[in-house]
Amino acid sequence: MQRLKISALWLCCITATTHANTQLETDLKVLTSPEHAGRGSGSIAINESARYIHTRFAEAGLDTYYQSFRFRQGLGKLGHGHNVVATLPCNALVCHKALVISAHYDHLGSRGSRYYPGANDNASGVVVMLDIAQRLASQLRHREITFVATDAEEKGLYGAHFFAATLTPSQVALNINLDMLAVSPKNRLYVLASKQASKFTDAIEPAFDSQIRALIYTSAASMARRLDTPRVDWLRASDHYAFHKVGIPFAYFGVGIDPNHHTPKDQFDKVNLPKLNQVSEHISAFISALSVSAAP
């Protein structure tokens, strides 16, 4: 039955591919533009990037709001962050535990006259999250799905920690964290999933195919060995760690190491847009399988 549901979803995805490519391109181009200046965090004012994401969620019909918080940056200095939170309610007769989809929108900002576009890190995750929200908005959902574009991830996962602290963990089935989804020529995504998420991650493999492969790990150490990144703790490397800390199962999707990571070369034109659209279709299929299923 799981495979039949995913196959039906593919018909929906195929008809929406042209639109999705166009919108993904538009969103990525905007978020990496000079006007967004590298999406730096810390200002008391809500920046252009947060406002753009808020507008895009609202246009898709989601209940959307800003969640502002403060965090320490440097010696005795307070920074201000602004998460963007959007929700699709359960619209079925029987509702199960919620899903939380996260992707940080902040990046390194600017340094003097140059800025860091952060196309892969993590405009790619944000535009895929926006695309997923659009795809799921018209579907039957047995779960509430909350999307959170977090701020101040680069400075210490502050936005994710703040948001996770507002949740009741027993009411959340899974966090799906999207961070750096612009796949390399090897066409691979790496998925780090907590052991508590195993009953959900069984639906990942059927949602993928030979276009984009998903390699699943339940150990951060095993993932580090596979990627030859002994100094990277993949459990703590992104926002999924904040959800793990409060006891919520997680599945983190990413491409691993990007040679342009945290450099000005992480640019719009380095992202293969057709592949990013495929990534969005695959992850959408996975999330849809969890949300349309009548199983808890």
Image (cartoon, helix red, strand yellow):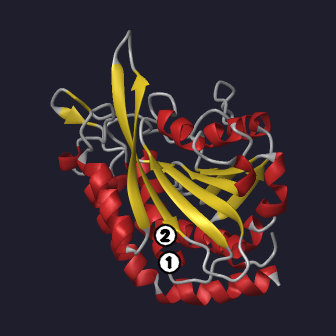
How many neighbours does mark 2 have within 10 angstroms: few (below 14), some (14-19), or many (20 or more)? many
Q: Secondary structure at mark 1?
A: loop
Which residue lies at the image location 28% right of the left edge and 58% below the top edge?
A: 52
Q: Is residue 243 above or below residue 73?
A: below
Which residue lies at the image location 65% right of the left edge and 42% below the top edge?
A: 243
In the picture of the structure, the residue carrying the numbered disc 1 is 137
Residue lying at the far top in this picture: please name it.
75
The amino acid pointed to by label 1 is: Ala
Residue 42 point in image, percent of width and height? 32, 31
Q: Is residue 166 left or right of residue 4?
A: left
In the picture of the structure, the residue carrying the numbered disc 2 is 133
Q: Nearer the viewer, residue 31 or 270?
A: 31
Which residue lies at the image location 46% right of the left edge and 81% below the top edge?
A: 17
The amino acid pointed to by label 2 is: Ala
Which residue lies at the image location 80% right of the left edge and 40% below the top edge?
A: 219
Residue 240 point in image, percent of width and height? 63, 43
Q: Is residue 166 above or below residue 29?
A: above
> Tags 1 and 2 in contact by the CB under 8 Å rule?
yes
State the count of labels.
Answer: 2
Residue 159 appears in the rendering: yes
Residue 119 point in image, percent of width and height? 38, 50
Residue 210 point in image, percent of width and height? 68, 71
Q: Is residue 90 above or below residue 196?
A: below
Q: Is residue 134 above or below residue 242?
A: below
